[in-house]
Image (spheres, rainbow, N blue to C red):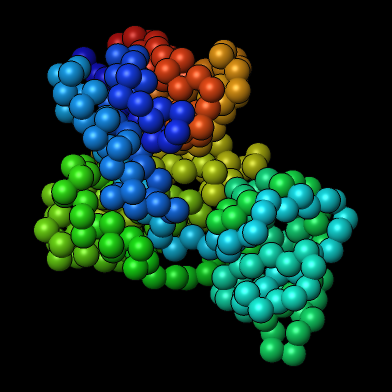
Amino acid sequence: MMRTEIFGTFGPACASEETLRKMIDAGVTGMRLNLSHTTLPASENYIRNFQNAAMQANVKPQILIDMQGPELRVGRLERPMELQEGEQVFLFDTDTCKKKRAVPVPTEVVKAVKAGEEILLDDGKILMQVEDEISPGGNVVAARVRRAGILQSHKSVKIIGKNIKLPPLTEHDIENIMVAKEYGVTALMQPFVCGGADLKYVRKVLKEHGAEDVKVFGKIENLLGVENIEDILPEADVIIIARGDLGNDMPLWELPGVQKEIEAACKKAKKPYIVVTQMLASMERHPVPTRAEVSDIFHAVYHGAWGVMLTGETAVGDYPVEAVQYLANTAKEAEKYIE
């Protein structure tokens, strides 16, 4: 009998051993730890509580670490910035910028962006259009806010239509890999995989640090990854269809078709895949999901997903246990329909 893997994400909403045990009872089979802004040692309480809860439930805990990887992010802000539609802001690659309404971004962004291009911040919640370069050294550009929002530190940055190549792993990632086995990590989620070489490099680093039995999950998060899916598939243990950033690389109405394209490639190669992002987003603040959300989960499993995953719903949501119940129960219904 098939059973879909049900993953949650660690966060303050599910920090206690009691809550994690309830999530396991509701159907969770593994937990994701986002290492973009933290480390394994700093997250030890989450991990040990989950391991203890799993031991009590007599299940083997799956712990997935989501690496920082080659993602471009906003730097540190002194406080959240409320960006209004139509206002001008300045993007800079150094902390010496004295202009008001200045947003620190990686050097690679400032160097790559051109006037007229659009930039998405925080998984597309905020949109701005570049106007011009205003510093002789080329380290500050002006941009106009086209879609308003509140910007916080370390949120994602994406130039629409451009892929900026960075090393697959950061120093921060390698430091976490060095202690992965000590914390019982079972799989590594590699962001923004662009080709098979990215995952080969990750496996090499894992082996160098005695963690070669940690599985490698390749996240497809941009069109380059979609184009190179045939090259990526042999190097991945599991493919993750990460619809958040993937949806920033195309008009959203094209995303479902691209998801089906990835699914078809995985099924042809007999490679398991996980569908993630906003599966029950409304349940971060509501005890019952939308009909569209449960339909999305049902069809993800019905069409062949090996696993489905919650992120903010369990990490910072008000109803982490209930969200797992809806995810797991909907997956079971899809399995019954398949059988």
Front-lying residue, 237 or 282 = 282
The residue furthest bottom is 136
Question: Image quadrant of residue 302?
Answer: top left
Quadrant where the N terminus is found in the figure: top left
Residue 107: image location, x then y, percent = 58, 76
- Is residue 175 something that shows in the picture? yes
Residue 295 position, x and y percent, is 53, 18
Direction right: furthest residue = 86
Determine the image quadrant of residue 206: bottom left
Q: Position of residue 291 (x, y in %)?
A: 59, 15
> Would you place residue 242 above or below residue 110 in this image?
above
User: In the picture, which quadrant includes the C terminus?
Assistant: top left
Residue at 56% over, 14% down: 287
User: Can residue 305 be seen?
Assistant: no
Q: Image point 35% across, 63% down: which residue?
A: 172
Q: Where, by quadrant of the figure, is residue 108 drawn?
A: bottom right
Residue 163, horizontal then vertical, whole percent: 54, 66
Is 105 placed left or right of 60 in the picture? right
User: How many circles with numbers are drawn on the protein?
Assistant: 0
Which residue shows up at 53% across the image and 69% down it?
A: 164
